[in-house]
Image (spheres, grey):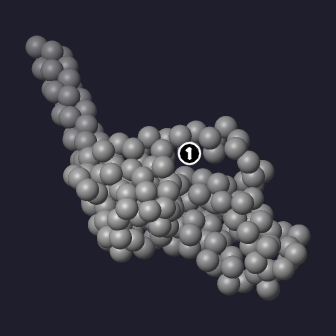
């Protein structure tokens, strides 16, 4: 098996597993797609220098490192312990966890795509949700490929902003919830102290 054939085999065999590792770490299906692509680019560059007996461990290590570097660069993880992410990974295939993660990611992709305005909504649905390549979308829509590429890139940028807003809202919500809980606890303590003194 030559390098090109071997790379095609690795891509078929491990793409879903790599995506699951990346999505589990970053929690964002669009970033997980990018990290998966980055992982296989690194795999391709180093195909001639690694032991094929340990292909799964090697690929999982690359995916884990890519995801951890991403988290560090986005300042979403204060302490990054690589062992949390690079543990014994399930055999490649659609195990229960992988199936659940893929379903969860699909639902999030659809939800975010539907929040975009036309024409970005349509092209985002075709590319990110249905996973159609851009040349295919251009042919089916009878549109110039450059136009489709531009819309996909702009849709991706809009999607990332939406996801950032959602994450910020979740963080604020958690913070206000804790604050409200402390206020309620203080009120109960004051009421108890008042009752004891009377």
Q: In which quarter of the image is the N terminus?
A: bottom right
Give the side of residue 96 with respect to residue 54, left or right.
left
Q: Is residue 137 above or below residue 105?
A: below
Question: Which residue corresponds to the image point at 30% horizontal and 52% vertical from the top-left?
Answer: 121
Q: Is residue 23 left or right of residue 78?
A: right
Q: Is residue 40 above or below residue 142?
A: below
Q: Please tell me in which quadrant of the rendered image residue 195 appears.
A: top left
Q: Where is residue 96 in the image (x, y as percent from the top left)?
A: 67, 37
Q: In this view, does 99 lie above or below 157?
A: above
Residue at the extreme front of the image, as rendered:
142
Residue 119: percent from left, percent from top: 26, 56
Between 189 and 44, which is closer to the camera in this rendering? 44
Is disc 1 surrounded by few (<14), some (14 to 19) or many (20+) residues within 10 Å?
some
Residue shown at 61% from the left, 77% from the top: 41
Q: Which residue is drawn at 47% across and 67% down?
A: 135
Q: In which quarter of the image is residue 189?
A: top left
Q: Name the residue under label 1.
A: 102
Residue 49 visible in this rendered orientation of the protein: yes
Q: Is residue 160 visible?
A: no
């Amino acid at each position: 098996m030559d390098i090109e054939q071997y790379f095609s085999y690795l891509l078929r065999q491990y793409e879903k597993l790599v995506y699951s590792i990346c999505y589990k770490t970053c929690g964002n299906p669009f970033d997980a797609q990018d990290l998966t692509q980055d992982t296989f680019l690194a795999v391709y560059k180093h195909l001639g220098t690694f032991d094929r007996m340990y292909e799964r461990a090697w690929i999982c290590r690359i995916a884990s490192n890519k995801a951890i570097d991403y988290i560090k660069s986005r300042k979403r993880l204060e302490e990054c312990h690589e062992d949390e992410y690079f543990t014994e990974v399930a055999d490649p295939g659609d195990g229960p966890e992988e199936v659940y993660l893929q379903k969860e990611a699909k639902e999030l992709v659809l939800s975010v795509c539907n929040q975009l305005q036309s024409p970005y909504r349509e092209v985002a649905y075709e590319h990110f949700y249905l996973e159609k390549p851009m040349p295919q979308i251009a042919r089916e829509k009878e549109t110039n490929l450059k136009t489709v590429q531009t819309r996909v890139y702009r849709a991706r940028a809009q999607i990332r902003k939406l996801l950032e807003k959602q994450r910020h809202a979740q963080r604020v919500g958690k913070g206000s919830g804790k604050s409200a809980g402390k206020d309620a606890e203080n009120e109960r303590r004051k009421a108890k102290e008042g009752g004891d003194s009377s």
